[in-house]
Image (cartoon, rainbow, N blue to C red):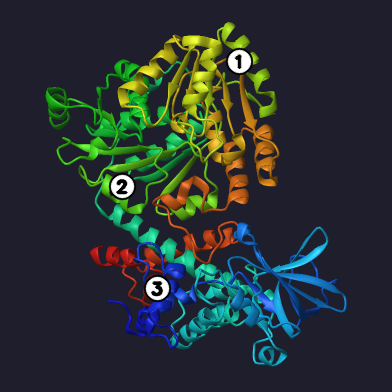
């Protein structure tokens, strides 16, 4: 049960004074967490962090006001500039002045009557907001405050500014947050005393008051102890939830897998190459986990082309040594078929039986495969989500390997292993992920990092080329395919639309066919499975030499003799995605090239991305740079994924706190697994506060 002391924070915001039904709907749209149906609680207002502050102590003249700073000006209203009927989309400007110059107070979609009432001609008013300059002329867009000197006297000298939504006034929102702070009860301290003193964290209530009632704009700095305290609280709740999930998975009695290593040795001997040091190190960690009686829950994180599939093969061979079956889950049918084809030749040599099961199987074919699985005639089953449908019954599932499922959240990981008798779980990703993101998304797992590439892999030469030189690129492509090369040509969209200037895959394929005829193939996500298979088979066999593709080829597609990739509109892709796409080449023993086609002019972020791509092939460095450039919310598509996003904490700014939270959470669950101690009870309140109700259920179930 949720502690009764928290009840005031879980009441609807409509119970706060001055927040009626209409306003509560607006506030809900602004601050309610995902899954709350737009209904906001008092707690949600407390966790709505300011984005800046108005400093009314800072009085400036128009001419000397620094650009980009929030300042307060005393100005006289001179005249209005209303847009004409033909230009209704243009803003309205209220022109004001002081002894040093003139400023345009700019409003979009504002009613003229409202503006004339707010800014009476000839009146002297105080306005606060951010000053910008265009062609030397000062401007303030939608000032944060407009009023007389008397009005300003009743306001705080430093006032927080919050992210807003249309129809909600800043004054009403600030009043709601102030009312929410009054509801905040005294709560027991949940942070470990040593962490509390080393980090100089204030108490929870004091931290919230410091941020929502700043005495100085610097109080809102995310590096200050008050803000860091709240970020740590959010991380700690997250890591406790993951630690409880981990305990739940580990609690289900596993069993030791792998005996004398005979099958592993046979499978390794079938490989046409030697294992890299990185592969050997990862395998030793995996085999040690599998040999224990508790379940393995491990993430194998490898760079593009680092050889994860071979590691998975040897882990599955270890499972077979104990008589257990393995399931290898791939995110797409293309990748599942590729895994099946790639593993089959090694399995035959090692004496392992392997089958492929996808949604395309039906009738007698499917029935035959299901019978082989339930009878134990198949050791390794490769497939898509079809592997976990109700009618798929395993004789003895001991290991689940999940490939490229960084978008899977904790709940999906739990459901994947409900088949069989508490099988071990190995999750693999070829998307290098920054350490802090790994802790955020996979804090319930042990992590192996696979460094290095197999011997013989050549470096990839990466160049950035403007669209102005497209004819040169096409001519170079022609010479390359005449010399026997194969290449990918990647486009962001499937077909041209009126709303986008991005060249579509279908249109690009048509253009290239005018030069190269039927040597041009096409593959994209809207094609049927058989159509994609046929297009990739033509490319692999060499019937087509160019495959025009969307990002369907981003992950796992393996054509070792493809040595060139052209990526159109490279400026529109994130760094990690560019790195994944580039990884489709450089997989054989030929020198390879990546051409990043961009549309000029480039913004600063796009320039930085393309520069990083030219400088390095190290996926882990690229992932860290991507986090800096894009922020954690967009990396890996996390907004659409099973991975949470944070409301207060910033993964880059507060990375050091994530490590501390992970260690503390694991130690607490190890020493007080049922959270029955005084600190454990306090931590329960923290979990409820940050919406980790599912973790409490795991606690009860455990």
Q: Which residue is mark 3?
A: 25
Please state the horizontal and vertical placement of residue 381, each as a whole percent of the image. 26, 29
Report the disc number at residue 295. 2
- Label 1 crowd (10 A; few <14 / some 14-19 / many >=20): many
User: Which residue is at a point 62% across and 51% down the rendered structure image?
Assistant: 628
Horizontal relation, residue 48 to residue 460: left or right: left
Determine the CA span between mark 3 and mark 2.
Answer: 46 Å
- Work out whether mark 3 precedes mark 2 in sequence or the reverse, and give the earlier one: 3
Horizontal relation, residue 688 to residue 701: left or right: right
The quadrant holding residue 405 is top left
Q: Which residue is mark 1?
A: 477
Q: Nearer the viewer, mark 3 or mark 2?
A: 3
| Quadrant placement of the C terminus | bottom left
| Quadrant placement of the N terminus | bottom left
Compared with 196, 488 (above or below) is above
Please state the horizontal and vertical placement of residue 423, each as a whole percent of the image. 26, 43
Which sits in the foreground, 141 or 362? 141
Q: Nearer the viewer, mark 3 or mark 1?
A: 3
SS at mark 3 in the image: helix
User: Which residue is at a point 56% across and 12% down the rendered structure image?
Assistant: 515
Q: Nearer the viewer, mark 1 or mark 2?
A: 1
Which sits in the foreground, 357 or 300? 357
Please state the horizontal and vertical placement of residue 675, each as a whole percent of the image. 34, 71
Extreme residue toward the front, this view: 85
The quadrant holding residue 373 is top left
- Work out whether mark 3 precedes mark 1 in sequence or the reverse, and give the earlier one: 3
């Amino acid at each position: 049960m949720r502690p009764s002391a928290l009840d005031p924070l879980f009441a609807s915001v409509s119970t706060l004074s001055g927040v009626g039904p209409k306003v509560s709907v607006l506030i809900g749209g602004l601050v309610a967490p995902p899954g709350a149906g737009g209904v906001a609680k008092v707690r949600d207002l407390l966790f709505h962090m300011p984005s800046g502050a108005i400093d009314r102590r800072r009085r400036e003249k128009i001419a000397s006001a620094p650009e980009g700073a929030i300042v307060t000006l005393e100005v006289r209203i001179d005249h209005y500039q209303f847009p004409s009927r033909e230009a209704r989309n243009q803003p309205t400007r209220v022109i004001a002045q002081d002894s040093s110059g003139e400023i345009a107070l700019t409003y979009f979609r504002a009613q003229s009557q409202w503006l004339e009432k707010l800014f009476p001609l000839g009146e002297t008013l105080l306005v606060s907001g951010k000053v910008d300059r265009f062609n030397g002329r000062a401007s303030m867009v939608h000032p944060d405050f407009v009023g007389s000197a008397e009005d300003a006297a009743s306001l705080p000298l430093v006032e927080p500014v919050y992210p807003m939504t249309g129809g909600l006034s800043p004054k009403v929102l600030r009043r709601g947050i102030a009312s929410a702070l009054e509801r905040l009860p005294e709560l027991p301290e949940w942070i470990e005393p040593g962490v509390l003193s080393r980090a100089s964290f204030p108490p929870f209530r004091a931290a919230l008051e410091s941020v929502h009632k700043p005495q100085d704009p610097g109080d809102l700095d995310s590096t200050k102890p008050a803000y860091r305290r709240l970020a740590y609280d959010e991380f700690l709740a997250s890591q406790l939830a993951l630690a409880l999930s981990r305990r739940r998975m580990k609690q289900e009695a596993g069993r030791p897998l792998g005996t004398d290593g005979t099958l592993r040795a046979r499978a390794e001997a079938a490989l046409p190459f030697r294992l890299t040091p990185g592969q050997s190190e990862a395998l030793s960690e995996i085999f040690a986990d599998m040999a224990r009686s508790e379940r393995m829950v491990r993430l194998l994180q490898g760079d593009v082309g680092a050889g994860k599939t071979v590691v998975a093969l040897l882990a599955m061979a270890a499972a077979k040594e104990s008589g257990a079956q393995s399931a290898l889950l791939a995110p797409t049918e293309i990748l599942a078929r590729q895994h099946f084809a790639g593993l089959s030749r090694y399995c035959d040599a090692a004496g392992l039986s392997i089958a492929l099961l996808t949604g395309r199987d039906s009738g007698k074919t499917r029935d035959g495969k299901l019978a082989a699985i339930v009878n134990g005639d198949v050791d390794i089953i490769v497939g898509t989500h079809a592997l976990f449908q109700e009618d798929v019954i395993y004789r003895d599932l001991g290991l689940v390997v999940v490939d490229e499922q960084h978008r899977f959240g904790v709940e999906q990981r739990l459901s994947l292993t409900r088949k069989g008798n508490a099988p071990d779980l190995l999750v693999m990703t070829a998307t290098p992920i920054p350490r802090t993101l790994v802790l955020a998304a996979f804090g319930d797992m042990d992590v192996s990092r696979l460094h290095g590439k197999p011997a013989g892999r050549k470096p990839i030469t990466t160049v950035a080329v403007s669209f102005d030189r497209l004819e040169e690129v096409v001519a170079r492509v022609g010479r390359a395919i005449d010399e026997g090369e194969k290449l990918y040509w990647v486009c962001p969209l499937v077909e041209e639309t009126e709303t986008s200037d991005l060249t579509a895959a279908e249109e690009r394929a048509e253009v290239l066919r005018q030069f190269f005829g039927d040597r041009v193939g096409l593959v994209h996500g809207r094609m049927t499975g058989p159509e994609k298979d046929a297009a990739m088979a033509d490319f692999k066999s060499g019937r087509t030499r160019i495959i025009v593709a969307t990002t369907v080829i981003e992950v796992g597609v393996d054509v070792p003799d493809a040595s060139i990739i052209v990526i159109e509109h490279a400026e529109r892709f994130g760094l990690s995605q560019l790195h994944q796409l580039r990884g489709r080449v450089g997989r054989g023993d030929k020198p390879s090239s990546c051409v990043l086609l961009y549309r000029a002019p480039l913004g600063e972020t796009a320039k930085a991305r393309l520069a990083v791509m030219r400088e390095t092939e190290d996926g882990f460095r690229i992932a860290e740079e991507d986090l800096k450039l894009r922020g954690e919310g967009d990396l890996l598509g996390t907004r659409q994924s099973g991975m949470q996003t944070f409301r207060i904490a910033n993964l880059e700014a507060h990375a050091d706190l994530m490590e501390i939270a992970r260690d503390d959470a694991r130690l607490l669950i190890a020493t007080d697994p049922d959270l029955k101690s005084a600190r454990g009870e306090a931590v329960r309140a923290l979990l409820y506060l940050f919406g980790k109700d599912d973790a409490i259920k795991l606690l009860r179930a455990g």
